[in-house]
Image (cartoon, rainbow, N blue to C red):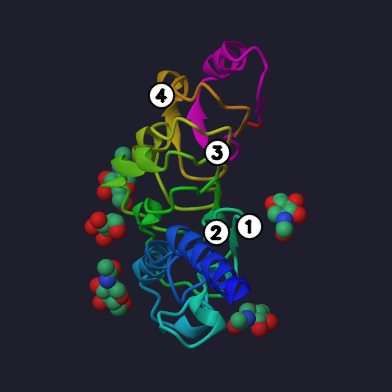
Amino acid sequence: MRGHSILIASWALAVSIILNGRQLCSGCFLEEKHALLDFKASLNVTTNAHLILSSWTGKEGDGANDDCCTWERVKCSNITGRIVELHLSDLRKNMSENWHANISTFIPLKDLRALDLSGNYFNSEVTGCRNWAKLQNLESLYLDDNNFNNSIIPCITAITELKRLSLSDLGLEGSFPIEEFKRLEKLEFLDLSSNRFSGSTSFTDVYFFRCGAFLLLF
Ligand SMILES: *[C@@H]1O[C@H](CO)[C@@H](O)[C@H](O)[C@H]1NC(C)=O
Ligand SMILES: *[C@@H]1O[C@H](CO)[C@@H](O)[C@H](O)[C@H]1NC(C)=O
Ligand SMILES: *[C@@H]1O[C@H](CO)[C@@H](O)[C@H](O)[C@H]1NC(C)=O
Ligand SMILES: *[C@@H]1O[C@H](CO)[C@@H](O)[C@H](O)[C@H]1NC(C)=O
Ligand SMILES: *[C@@H]1O[C@H](CO)[C@@H](O)[C@H](O)[C@H]1NC(C)=O
């Protein structure tokens, strides 16, 4: 009998630990799952939508698929159970329609460390991106090959934890906004290739302000 109650007590303890950390009956945090579904909806894909992120479904309680940690292109921490990486490059399957992406939908992902959205040719409405500063743990951001413009720069440089940043072929132009990029004090790697920045002296400035600590590819 005694053994029995110890067993029950430890079971109850285990359950309370699990409940503190995770949502019941779901392998991943509910708000994180909803964030992913919000992002998918923001793409507004109309043609062949079933081909895009097909494992990302909103169905509740129908087994493995409800656990967003098992969804394609998602990586969760095996300690916290939170999403730490999203590998969302080259989502298009021969589709030429305009895609929008609301990157703010990822703000609820408190432990997100790496986000790759390259190669999607997003026509993003970058208005409203100011709240990207709330992506507080984001260390790696890959946005290459999207149809953004200079108005995205202040939003990116507001993500102050960034260490790796790849902005190749984003349609950036004009004089290089060095003061903006100086905000990224932790930056170790920056790729700005295939943009249309003017002037070459500014590039030298950037190189020296980090004493060569990061690689620049122009
Ligand atoms: C989503 O796509 C439909 C059909 O192309 C279009 O009518 C609608 O305006 C789009 N919505 C947004 C937010 O772009
Ligand atoms: C947890 O993840 C780390 C790296 O992400 C890995 O090295 C480790 O083996 C994993 N532990 C378990 C129990 O899966
Ligand atoms: C994309 O286009 C290529 C070549 O036109 C074709 O082989 C491939 O099956 C297409 N993929 C999809 C998902 O339609
Ligand atoms: C983008 O997502 C955020 C967070 O879900 C939301 O508050 C905002 O209204 C969305 N913006 C657009 C243009 O849909
Ligand atoms: C950047 O793109 C947005 C959305 O497409 C547009 O509203 C804005 O005018 C553009 N800004 C510049 C400086 O081209």
Asked if labels 2 and 4 touch by Cβ distance under 8 angstroms, the answer is: no
Residue 218: image x %, image y %?
63, 31
Asked if labels 2 and 1 touch by Cβ distance under 8 angstroms, the answer is: yes
Task: Tell which tag, 1 or 3, sits nearer the viewer.
Answer: 1
Mark 2 = which residue? 81
Q: Amino acid at mark 4?
A: Glu
**Ligand 2 within 8 Å, label 1 CB:** yes
User: Sequence order check: which comes first, mark 3 or mark 2?
Assistant: 2
User: Is the N terminus in the top left, top right, bottom left or bottom right quadrant?
Assistant: bottom right
Residue 121: image x %, image y %?
48, 59
Mark 4 = which residue? 180
Gap between marks 1 and 3 measured at Cα: 19 Å
Mark 1 = which residue? 78
Residue segment shown in magenta: 191-216
As drawn, is 155 to the left or to the right of 209? Answer: left
Q: Amino acid at mark 3?
A: Glu
Q: Amino acid at mark 2?
A: Gly
Callout 4 secondary element: helix
**Residue 211 forms part of the magenta stretch:** yes
User: Sequence order check: which comes first, mark 3 or mark 4?
Assistant: 3
**Residue 120 forms part of the magenta stretch:** no
**Residue placed at 43% from the left, 38% from the top?**
136
**Residue placed at 52% from the left, 16% from the top?**
202
Asked if labels 2 and 3 touch by Cβ distance under 8 angstroms, the answer is: no
Q: Nearer the viewer, residue 18 or 72?
A: 18
**Residue placed at 41% from the left, 83% from the top?**
60
User: Sequence order check: which comes first, mark 1 or mark 3?
Assistant: 1
Task: Tell which tag, 3 or 4, sits nearer the viewer.
Answer: 3
Mark 3 = which residue? 139
